[in-house]
Amino acid sequence: MPKAFTPKVVTANHLLAGDVIYQTADGWSRKLEEAEVLTDEADADLRLIEASQQVDEVVGAYLADVAVEDGVPVPTHFREEFRATGPSNYAHGKQVELS
């Protein structure tokens, strides 16, 4: 029996800056809470294809599992939690914003 589809977001890295970015309904954001949550598998596949074709802006696009808490997507896997908060070598970028 196939595994049930769970909510996802499209994520990638910004081609020039290298930052983790998330696909929104009308572009890209560096904030997970602004990501478009995809609940339909066919729609998610289509959005991933669209993201993968934006080779002048993004690299490494893929679907990441999320849960929705109070209307906001949150990571369900350690890797995605780590990517959402930024590098861990010292506080900068997103880590400073979250403090």
Image (cartoon, rainbow, N blue to C red):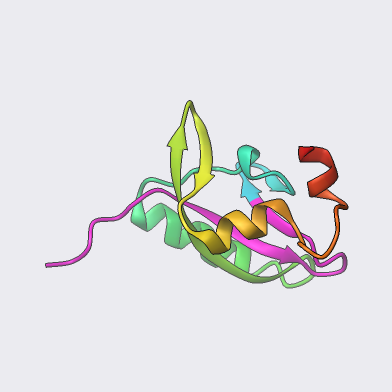
Residue 30 covered by magenta stretch: no
Q: Residue shown at 36%/57% (left/top)?
A: 42
Up/down of 36 relative to 53, above or below? above
Quadrant for the N terminus, please: bottom left
Of 19 and 59, nearer the camera is 19
Looking at the image, the residue that sits furthest to the top is 70
Q: Position of residue 63 (x, y in %)?
A: 50, 62
Residue 20 covered by magenta stretch: yes
Query: How many callouts does the rendering have?
Result: 0
Of 97 and 16, nearer the camera is 97
In the displayed structure image, the side of residue 32 where residue 9 appears, left or right: left
Q: Residue shown at 61%/59% (left/top)?
A: 11
Q: Residue shown at 79%/48% (left/top)?
A: 95
Up/down of 3 relative to 30, above or below? below
Looking at the image, the residue that sits furthest to the front is 90
In the displayed structure image, the side of residue 41 where residue 74 appears, left or right: right
Q: Position of residue 30 (x, y in %)?
A: 74, 49
Q: Residue shown at 18%/66% (left/top)?
A: 2
Looking at the image, the residue that sits furthest to the left is 1
Specify the quadrant of the image occupied by residue 54.
bottom right
Of 6 and 91, nearer the camera is 91
Specify the quadrant of the image occupied by residue 36.
top right
Quadrant for the C terminus, please: top right
- The magenta region covers 1-22
In the displayed structure image, the side of residue 90 where residue 65 appears, left or right: left
Q: Position of residue 51 (x, y in %)?
A: 62, 63
Q: Position of residue 20 (x, y in %)?
A: 72, 59
In the displayed structure image, the side of residue 39 where residue 29 appears, left or right: right
